[in-house]
Image: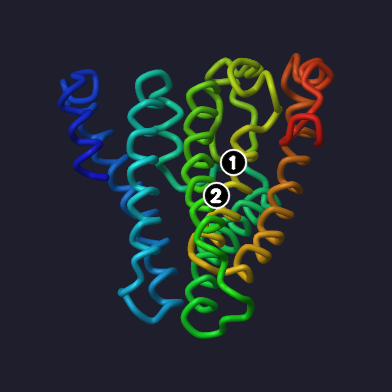
């Protein structure tokens, strides 16, 4: 991951011609590395061993897709990436939203890898998913992170917390995947979490994704309420784009 992003920073001078540009590269690399390290810790603490090839493969896919995605997003919306490499908290953020963010991160992006490690190596609650199903899970995991990158590229205001951004001239994002569903960034979460559980070989972890996804849906609804009240044009956008996460379903 570090080599990938530094390659792009050297290949494309807009990332590295100024100290500020290189400082931003270092911050992005540090954040991506920290995120991967947290996931790795959850996986290997749960498993009780580092000898888990599927965990290493998943980490490699995570680093590759996020590293390339960070470069792609930085090209068009550096301000978004600058905010997203910071902690997902803001002074204007409500306590409820902070709790929901931490809940999704703790139960989903940390809890699912931890549970998968415990289940695969110790509990074995259910049978192991077949290889074809597990492979489909890894593909879904990669596609989910790719969808998050596409959503960030399409939305200049996709910060981590639910808030209006008048200082940046906040407007409704209605291009790219936002023409299809209202929350493509959130739509990636089921792919990532279900995919991780299946690839790692744990139906128990796959079923447990219901908890973080439920918290995500609660947060999604609150976000629509906030933006519907405060962001001009958002109510009309909700009428125009009917589906929140899954086209034709919801």
Quarter holding the C terminus is top right
Depth order, front residue of 89/235: 235
Residue topped by disc 2: 192
Within 10 Å of disc 2 (Cα), the crowding (few <14, some 14-19, many 20+) is many
Q: Tag 2, which secondary structure?
A: helix
> x%, y% of residue 173?
63, 19
Q: Position of residue 42 (x, y in %)?
A: 44, 69
Disc sitting over residue 231 in the figure: none
What SS does tag 1 mark? helix
Q: Quadrant of residue 53?
A: bottom left
Question: Circles 2 and 1: CB distance less than 8 Å?
Answer: yes
Assign the N terminus to one quadrant of the image: top left
Residue closest to the far right: 239
**Is residue 90 rendered to the left or right of residue 16?**
right
Q: Which residue is mark 1?
A: 188
Q: Residues within 10 Å of mark 1 (few under 14, many from 20)?
A: many
Above or below, comparing residue 201 to residue 149 in the picture: below
Taking the spot 33% from the left edge, 29% from the top edge, the residue there is 71
Looking at the image, residue 233 lies above or below residue 28: above
- Residue shown at 34% from the left, 47% from the top: 63
Q: Classify 89 as above or below 13.
A: below
Using residue 222 as the reference point, say whether residue 196 is left or right of it: left
């Amino acid at each position: 991951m570090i080599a990938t992003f530094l390659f792009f920073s050297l290949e494309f001078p807009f990332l590295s011609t100024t100290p500020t540009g290189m400082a931003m590269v270092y911050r992005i690399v540090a954040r991506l590395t920290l995120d991967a390290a947290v996931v790795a810790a959850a996986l290997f603490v749960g498993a009780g061993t580092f000898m888990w090839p599927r965990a290493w493969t998943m980490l490699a896919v995570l680093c590759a897709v996020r590293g390339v995605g960070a470069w792609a997003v930085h090209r068009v919306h550096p301000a978004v990436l600058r905010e997203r490499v910071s902690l997902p908290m803001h002074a204007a953020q409500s306590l409820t939203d902070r709790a929901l963010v931490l809940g999704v991160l703790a139960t989903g992006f940390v809890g699912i890898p931890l549970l998968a490690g415990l289940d695969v190596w110790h509990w074995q609650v259910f049978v192991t998913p077949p290889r074809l199903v597990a492979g489909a899970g890894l593909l879904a995991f990669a596609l989910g992170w790719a969808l998050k990158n596409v959503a960030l590229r399409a939305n200049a205001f996709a910060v981590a917390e639910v808030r209006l951004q008048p200082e940046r001239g906040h407007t409704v994002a209605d291009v790219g995947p936002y023409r299809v569903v209202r929350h493509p960034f959130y739509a990636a979460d089921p792919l990532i979490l279900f995919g991780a559980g299946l690839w790692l070989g744990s139906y128990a972890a796959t079923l447990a994704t219901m908890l973080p996804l439920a918290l995500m849906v609660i947060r999604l609804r609150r976000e629509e309420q906030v933006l519907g009240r405060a962001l001009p044009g958002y109510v009309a956008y909700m009428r125009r784009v009917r589906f929140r996460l899954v086209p034709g379903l919801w």
